[in-house]
Image (cartoon, helix red, strand yellow):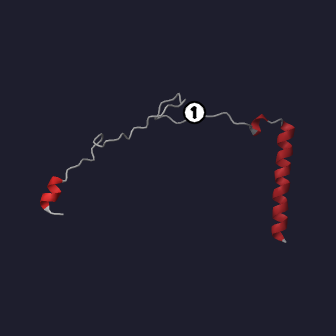
Amino acid sequence: MTQSALQSHGHSHAHGAHGHSHAHNHAHGHSHDPAAPHPAQPAPWSILRMPVATRLGAALAASAVLWVIVIMAMR
């Protein structure tokens, strides 16, 4: 481009200079400050809410599966 073409070609990248908005304008149900992290959501299930017998059974089952993997890997 020539110097005169560069001078006549004026545009700005300043905020708000464009003909459209870059704003994030949609309504939603958040009730916290936009800069704050999202609040914790309740877990659908928790291992801590399981009865002790169920937790023990789950631990034994997981242990058995891991031992099977170890034994199969040693063959």
Quadrant in which the N terminus is drawn: bottom left
Residue at x 30% of width, y 41% of height: 15
Quadrant in which the C terminus is drawn: bottom right
* Residue 74 appears left or right of 23: right
Q: Residue furthest top?
A: 31
As displayed, is residue 66 above or below residue 18?
A: below
As displayed, is residue 71 above or below residue 19?
A: below
Residue at x 85% of width, y 61% of height: 68
Residue at x 83% of width, y 46% of height: 58
Residue 74 in the image: x percent, y percent? Answer: 82, 70
Q: In the rendered image, which quarter is residue 5 located in? A: bottom left
Residue 69 in the image: x percent, y percent? Answer: 81, 62
Q: Looking at numbered disc 1 in the image, what kind of residue is underneath it?
A: Pro
Q: Residue furthest left?
A: 4
Q: In the rendered image, which quarter is residue 53 located in? A: top right
Camera-nearest residue between 9 and 39 = 9
Which residue is label 1 attached to? Answer: 39
* Number of callouts: 1
Q: Residues within 10 Å of mark 1 (few under 14, many from 20)?
A: few
Residue 19 in the image: x percent, y percent? Answer: 31, 42
- At numbered mark 1, what does the secondary structure look like: helix, strand or loop? loop
Camera-nearest residue between 5 and 15 = 5
Camera-nearest residue between 38 and 25 = 25
Residue 34 in the image: x percent, y percent? Answer: 47, 34
Residue at x 15% of width, y 63% of height: 2
Camera-nearest residue between 9 and 55 = 9
* Residue 24 appears left or right of 18: right
* Residue 34 appears left or right of 61: left
